[in-house]
Image (spheres, rainbow, N blue to C red):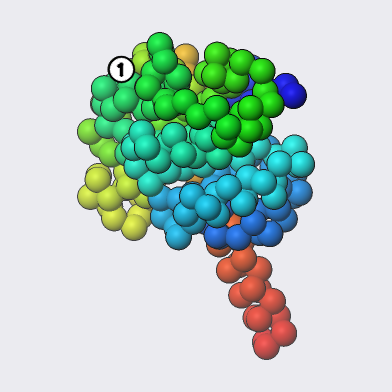
Amino acid sequence: MELPKNQFKAALQAGQQQIGLWCSTPDAGVAEVLANCGFDWVMIDTEHSVIDQGRVLAMLQATAPYPTHFGVRPGWNDAVEIKRLLDSSAQTILVPYVQTAEEAARAVAAMRYPPHGMRGVSALSRASRYGAIPDYTARANAEVCLLVQVETASALAQIEAIAAVDGVDGIFIGPADLAASMGHPGNPGHPEVKAAILDAIRRIVAAGTPAGILSLDPGFLSDAIAAGTTFTAVDTDTALLQRGARAAAARWKG
């Protein structure tokens, strides 16, 4: 059995726009539905949801036959949590709240097997297809993709240093937490926040690193793509469900 190619990572390296969706619903069936909707990637969010490790595994199993790439956001920059997600077969990890180059380097170490990192070795994990992939431990580092999330005003000042860390495959701007840190909680659409995000995207791209964003504002998403994002999340499963349900209720009750 061959080591699965991380097509998402390859696309980022090639500069190809990847349109994505956020998934916070703890259900493998929902994930499978999303896997067949045409998105390039879907991020399973365990930071701000009740999705646990077991549900992540079920969601990855359900979506494996589909071309959409599924990444996972852990709750924190925690080596044990990252190790378990990788062993479940996740190849792309989005680490939240990375503030410095040192924290980015810690995430890189958690993603990689020795001698380039500290990922623990399990001979019979799902990632190695229970030992069926030859030399998995020696080859896995090439196919894992680390995205780090910059989401405070102080972290924006560290973009160039974070981008310079070997093993950081992309930098994602978190609008909600950034807005809060800039004194505009609950208002990521504030002009100061938008300006800071677009400036950050341009700096990430200038540093030679793929940039990413999540927003439900179509106009701002167009601005972000123009500024240089190459992994762009354009909606969330919860928001889609809510909009659709409210529209149906309004139509038939109106």
Q: Quadrant of the C terminus?
A: bottom right
Residue at horizontal 72 percent and vertical 22 percent from the top: 2
* Disc 1 packing (10 Å; few <14; some 14–19; many ≥20): few
Compared to 248, does 200 lie above or below?
above
Q: Residue furthest bottom?
A: 253
- Establish if 199 lies above or below 219: above
Q: How many marks?
A: 1
Q: Is residue 130 visible?
A: yes
Q: Amino acid at mark 1?
A: Ala
Nearer-the-camera pick, 77 or 203: 77
Question: What residue lies at 67% left-to-right and 46% top-to-bottom?
Answer: 61
**Location of residue 136 by image quarter:** top right
Depth check, front residue: 87 or 50: 87
Disc 1, SS: helix
Q: Residue at x 47, y 54 (%)?
A: 52
| Rendered location of residue 124, percent (x, y) | 58, 32
Residue at image point 67% right, 23% down: 133
Pick the front one: 144 or 193: 144
Q: Is residue 229 visible?
A: no
Q: Vertically, is 49 above or below 15?
A: below
**Horizontally, is 4 left or right of 73 in the view?**
right
x, y percentage for residue 179?
31, 47
The quarter of the picture where the N terminus appears is top right
Which residue does the numbered mark 1 point to in the structure image?
161
Coordinates of residue 112 in the picture (x, y in percent): 45, 21
In the depicted structure, whether residue 87 falls above or below residue 44: above
What is the x, y in percent for residue 64? 71, 41
Left or right: residue 95 compared with residue 154: right
In this view, the residue in front, 142 or 121, is 121
